[in-house]
Image (cartoon, rainbow, N blue to C red):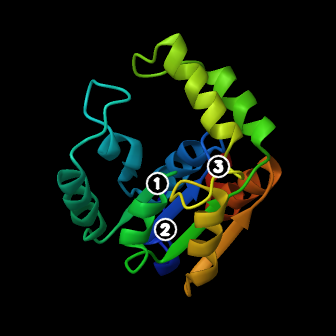
Amino acid sequence: MEISKTPAAFDRTLIMGNGGTGKTWLARRLAERFQHPVVHLDDIHWEPGYYGVARDKTARNEMVKSAAQQSWWIMEGVYGELANMVLDRATTLVWIDLPEDECIANIEQRGAQGGESKTSFDGLLRWVAEYRMRTNNWNSFEAHARLFAGFAGRKALLSSRIAVSRFAEIAIPRQEVSSR
């Protein structure tokens, strides 16, 4: 079955949330549906091949701004500062806000990635657990709530795995899912 034209609301979709919420999963589903490129902010934030080594901030910011200037994209990540840079280009903002224990369970299930050491993996789990406790930090519940509240466009707050799945189903109509 031929995929229909993307509704304008999904031209540039930004997905944010804590680590382990399913941002990448949702981004891949939407990108498949709409044939948009996925921009993983982790790939921009970290040096290639050096998990845990942040890219030069100026280079990182330029890469994010350049990606945001494209006509179509699905962008996902935890980085509130980077999300803030592209909000004026986003046509839809999705905030996945799941309980930390669910996020941690998801990360534990997927395991270490990108050459993470046991120490860095354990640090990631602690960092995810502190999402609601961090203050004055772009990568926190507080910052994401502020970005979400200030966004005037189409937005969705997804607070359960069921809500994330339903959002994907809305974007991917059943007749298309069943015909693949």
Horizontal side, residue 162 vs residue 104: left or right: right
State whether residue 50 appears in this view.
Answer: yes
Which SS class for mark 2?
A: loop
Q: Relative to 35, say whether 119 is above or below.
A: above
Mark 1 to mark 3 CA distance (whole Å): 31 Å
List the single residue furthest toward the top: 118
Mark 2 to mark 3 CA distance (whole Å): 13 Å
- Residue at 55%, 61% in the rendered image: 136
Where's residue 4, x and y in %? 48, 68
Q: Which mark is residue 177?
A: 3
Question: Do labels 1 and 2 touch, CB within 8 Å?
Answer: no
Residue, disc 1 = 79
Q: Relative to 90, say whether 118 is above or below.
A: above
Q: Which comes before the other along the chain, label 1 or label 2?
A: 2
Under mark 2, the amino acid is: Ser
Q: Quadrant of the C terminus?
A: top right
Where's residue 84, x and y in %? 43, 70
Under mark 3, the amino acid is: Val
Where's residue 1, x and y in %? 52, 55
